[in-house]
Image: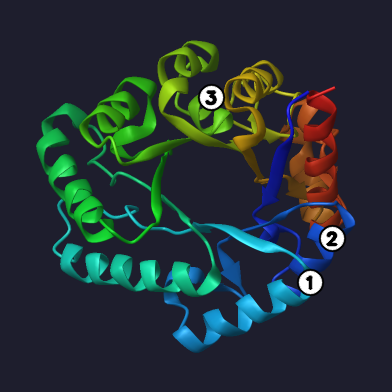
Amino acid sequence: MAQYKLFAFADEAGASLDEQIAAMKRNGLDGLEIRFVDGKNVAAFTVEEAKEVKKKMDDAGLVTWSIGSPLGKLEIDSEDFPIHLDTFKHTLELAHILGADHLRMFSFYTPKGQSPADYKEAVMEKLGAFVRAAEGSGILLCHENEKGIYGDVASRCLEIAKAFPSMRLVFDPANFVQCGQETLSAWQMLKPYTHYMHIKDALSDGSIVPAGEGIGNVAAIAKDYLAMKGGASAFTVEPHLKVFGGLGELERQGEDSAVEKAFVFRTNGEAFDAACSYFRKTLL
């Protein structure tokens, strides 16, 4: 099997960077797709905070692979886009400090009940502003499919990829399942444009389960991705698994499916470890 790098949204294991580093190390991961530290989103870090994170990661022998930014998670008709663009430029600066050469992003929320096609021109205009701002930065912009944004289904992800050749895609099987998109057909359409994968799986009702336990075809897609990318393969584990929250949670489980009930964990760390373990099993 081809070699690959395995990263994670380790904020799902613990809020502090120390907890995140411990979780990555005990699971033998290569590093972090950074999103939150102590509840603060990476895009809101100061330069000094980013330098502190970089030092701790270096000391631990880990890398920050990608910036798990919220950029592009904005209503397409919002008047706040100029502020959002300034945040984007600041995040590029943070990426350099952190040593990350990838930036995960999105393609804007379109109004519910209206056709996304009516907003294609506006989406492309704003994505183009991001692309122009990143020119010459050495940071690769990577668009993730996410429920509710313009690029939530494969056909519109393909539009984005073709419109911006310098941008690549993050393929998230569970997010496609939640949008009613069959994942194998989506993969065949998007694999030439996919740079890396987010690893989570889902049931037909959208509930998140460990890799290989849902209908996202994670194993087949990940193996095909490995064959395509070889040693350049990279995955980010994104657990999103349920953690037992006491009696109220126990009562709510009566409404869950049998599969969901099997994947409720005692702690965030336990859920994180399970997500890593299940994914590795899918590659066997």
Q: In screen coordinates, is 109 left or right of 215? A: left
Local packing at callout 3 (Cα closer than 10 Å; few below 14, some 14-19, many 20+) is: many
Mark 1 crowd level (few <14, some 14–19, many ≥20, 10 Å Cα):
some
Q: Residue at x 66, y 81 (%)?
A: 55
Give the label, 3 or 2, closer to the camera. Answer: 2
Q: CA distance from mark 3 to mark 1?
A: 36 Å
Q: Which residue has dot 1 on it? A: 60
- One can see residue 49 in this view: yes
Mark nearer the N terminus (3 vs 2): 2
Q: Label 3's element?
A: helix
What is the spatial separation of the Cα atoms under label 1 and label 2, in whole angstroms? Answer: 8 Å
81 vs 232, nearest the viewer: 232
Going by the numbered disc 2, the residue's amino acid type is: Lys
**Of helix, strand and loop, which one carries label 2?**
helix
Q: For residue 25, which numbered disc appears in the image?
A: 2
Vertical side of 130 occupied by 125: above or below: above
Task: Tell me where residue 178 appears, x and y as whole percent.
Answer: 51, 29
Find disc 3 in the rendering and name its residue.
177
Name the amino acid type tagged 3.
Val
- Name the N-terminal-most of marks 1 and 2: 2
Q: Position of residue 38 (x, y in %)?
A: 63, 77
| Kind of residue at disc 1 | Ala
- At x 70%, y 43%, the residue is 5
Taking depth in this image into account, of 69 and 97 the one nearest to the observer is 97
Q: Position of residue 201 (x, y in %)?
A: 66, 30
Decide if residue 28 is on the left or right side of residue 145: right
Q: Is residue 258 visible?
A: no
The quarter of the rendered structure image containing the C terminus is: top right
Disc 1 is placed on an element classified as helix
